[in-house]
Image: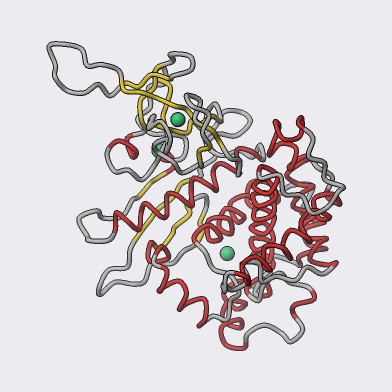
Amino acid sequence: MRIFECTRCHHAAFFENTRCVHCDAVLAYDFEQDKMLSLEPMAHTPPSNQPSSIYQSFTDGQKYHLCQNNSQYGVCNSAIAEKNSGQYCSSCQLNELIPDLSVAGNLAAWQAVEQAKRRLIYTLYQLGLPVNRDKNGLPTGLRFAFLADSIGQNNVMTGHDAGLITINIAEADAPFREKLRVDMGEGYRTLLGHFRHEIGHFYWDILVRNSKWLSEFRTLFGDENQNYSEALQRHYECGPVPGWQSDFISSYATMHPWEDWAETWAHYMHMIDTLETARFYGLSLDARISLDAETLSTGSIAVKKADFKELMAGWIPLTVALNSLNRSMGLKDPYPFKLTSHIVQKIEFVHRLINN
Ligand SMILES: [Zn+2]
Ligand SMILES: [Zn+2]
Ligand SMILES: [Zn+2]
């Protein structure tokens, strides 16, 4: 993730900010232009005394309106150019179902879910992947449903089905998530991680299935035709095979080639986002990744297009530093993964597929 700035006062701004902490301008991210906008509300037009819902950019006077999930619920910080008629930003328009907001706590959970989702969507755009529409302008079918368990009903399963990504909003609750992480013996469990995993299934369907990549996929990840429900049952009954760490990024990845793919895909997204952030803070722990002015200005694109060996050379020392910094603060390792050559081969496959 890049670090943005308020274009009015040039103070640093984060992706999630809604106000400039220095000059109080309204900040809103525009997915279409990939820009953080500094805005001011336009004066109301008499005879109405209602404040105007139209905002004007401090830099070029362009007019915008806020995404409805921004103005109405505060779960989004996007603006949309006034000439575009849609109510919702590129991220919010993918929502098919949102939680029941009459239930206490659901708004806060939804807010956390949307924040993770916006990061996901940001990186997908940076990677040039089809999000709302494919290269022919047709809808990709990607949608999101954010649901809560209700008493007496089946638990909501986080998962992907034919373009619909369902997230159980209980995952926004840190104690709930941490308990599951420990119960399931996972090293890493985050909302953002769920999004990156599930979107991996979505892209398998549209980029790997029926493509020239399928045979290489099978060589690296195994045959996806093996029975999924049997694999699931075996995984929960017997656990991963001993020594799984040399071939799989996580124990969950051992379950079925599709899960190995989704876990590997998610890992690639972790890498790209974290490397991009590091670069914007001027952190480079390997001289082979240059930090010249041109690279900085092109930011994520440079990370994406970088040679895979370069990415890896930058990534490994960065993760060591990341863990060490956290240990200095008495925190657990944010990067509890070990990359072996087989795992790196699989990540490289994802890199090649995305950048081909
Ligand atoms: Zn400012
Ligand atoms: Zn929005
Ligand atoms: Zn999965």
Q: Is residue 328 left or right of residue 142?
A: right
Please determine whether, in this image, residue 334 is positioned above or below residue 23.
below
The residue at 57%/81% (across/down) is 185
The residue closer to the viewer here, 281 or 31, is: 281
The residue at 78%/73% (across/down) is 247
Quadrant assignment for the N terminus = top right
Query: For the image shown, how many numbered marks are present on the structure?
Result: 0
Quadrant assignment for the C terminus = top right
The residue closer to the viewer here, 336 or 288, is: 288
Residue 121 pos. (x, y %): 54, 43
The residue closer to the viewer here, 189 or 343, is: 189
The residue at 44%/15% (across/down) is 62
Q: What is the basis of the colouring in this image?
A: secondary structure
Which quadrant of the view contains residue 4? top right
Q: Is residue 356 left or right of residue 331?
A: right
Residue 269 pos. (x, y %): 65, 52
Please determine whether, in this image, residue 266 is positioned above or below residue 41.
below
The residue closer to the viewer here, 295 or 267, is: 295
Please determine whether, in this image, residue 286 is positioned above or below residue 262.
above
Q: Is residue 184 left or right of residue 243?
A: left
Residue 52 pos. (x, y %): 25, 21
Which quadrant of the view contains residue 235? bottom right
Please determine whether, in this image, residue 101 is positioned above or below residue 77.
below
Of the four image quadrants, the one with ligand 1 is top left
Residue 190 pos. (x, y %): 52, 64
